[in-house]
Image (cartoon, rainbow, N blue to C red):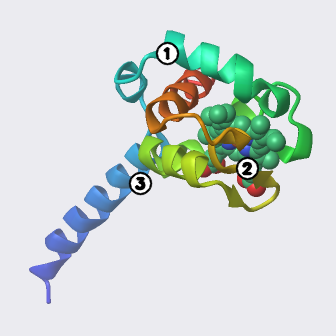
Amino acid sequence: MKRFVPVLSLFTVLTLSFGCEAEAAVTAADVAKHNVANGKAVYDANCAACHASGILKAPKTGVKADWAARLPQGMDTMIKKSIDGYTAAGSMPARGGNADLTDQQVSDAVAYMVKSVL
Ligand code: HEC
């Protein structure tokens, strides 16, 4: 049994360090994969109506506290939920309600919003 203790300790350390990484699951590198300038234009036209004011419980752009529990999901999950739409505390319409937006445009807008809270 004794020889398992170091293994267990190592496991604990690894679990804890992964736990810390999860909190910073979204990094500047994730944002840099997107065209943030294009994202701002998409955001201004399609997303700001809800995300600037926080209407309908939308997380506000630039307000870190609104995103603290969301960022750990990771960029891909947040993008997918923005494309598909979802309902939790409030209701996020698919593609912000504009079916003409491409996946790329929605992704860039998410990157713009995320950048504002990193
Ligand atoms: C009609 C209002 C409305 C519009 C327009 C809107 N959103 Fe949202 N959005 C919401 C609400 C409300 C939530 C929070 C839903 C919840 O968590 O219950 C949300 C959540 C989100 C989230 C967080 C997702 C997560 O996983 O926590 C992202 C990212 C997002 N929206 C991106 C966008 C983008 C990009 C656009 C524009 C293309 C957009 N939204 C347009 C209302 C809106």
Taking depth in this image into account, of 4 and 58 the one nearest to the observer is 58
The mark nearer the N terminus, 1 or 3, is 3
Expressed as whole percent of the image width and height from the top left, the position of residue 116 reads 62, 19
Q: Which mark is residue 19?
A: 3
Side (left or right) of 16 relative to 88: left
Expressed as whole percent of the image width and height from the top left, the position of residue 21 reads 38, 44
Residue type at tag 1 = Val
Give the residue number, with chain letter if any, for mark 2.
92
Residue type at tag 2 = Met
The alpha-carbon separation of the residues under discs 2 and 1 comes to 21 Å
Side (left or right) of 80 relative to 57: left
Compared with 95, 6 (above or below) is below
The alpha-carbon separation of the residues under discs 1 and 3 comes to 28 Å
Ligand 1 position by quadrant: top right
Query: Can I make out residue 63 in this image?
Result: no
Kindly tell me whether mark 2's CB lies below 8 Å from ligand 1: yes
Compared with 28, 94 (above or below) is below
Instruction: Determine the residue positioned at 52% across, 9% down.
Output: 37
Q: Residue furthest front?
A: 100
Side (left or right) of 63 relative to 22: right
The alpha-carbon separation of the residues under discs 3 and 2 comes to 28 Å
Crowding near pointer 2: few (<14 within 10 Å), some, many (20+)?
many
Give the residue number, with chain letter if any, for mark 1.
36
Crowding near pointer 1: few (<14 within 10 Å), some, many (20+)?
many
Expressed as whole percent of the image width and height from the top left, the position of residue 74 reads 46, 46
Residue type at tag 3 = Gly
Side (left or right) of 70 relative to 32: right
Taking depth in this image into account, of 39 and 72 the one nearest to the observer is 39
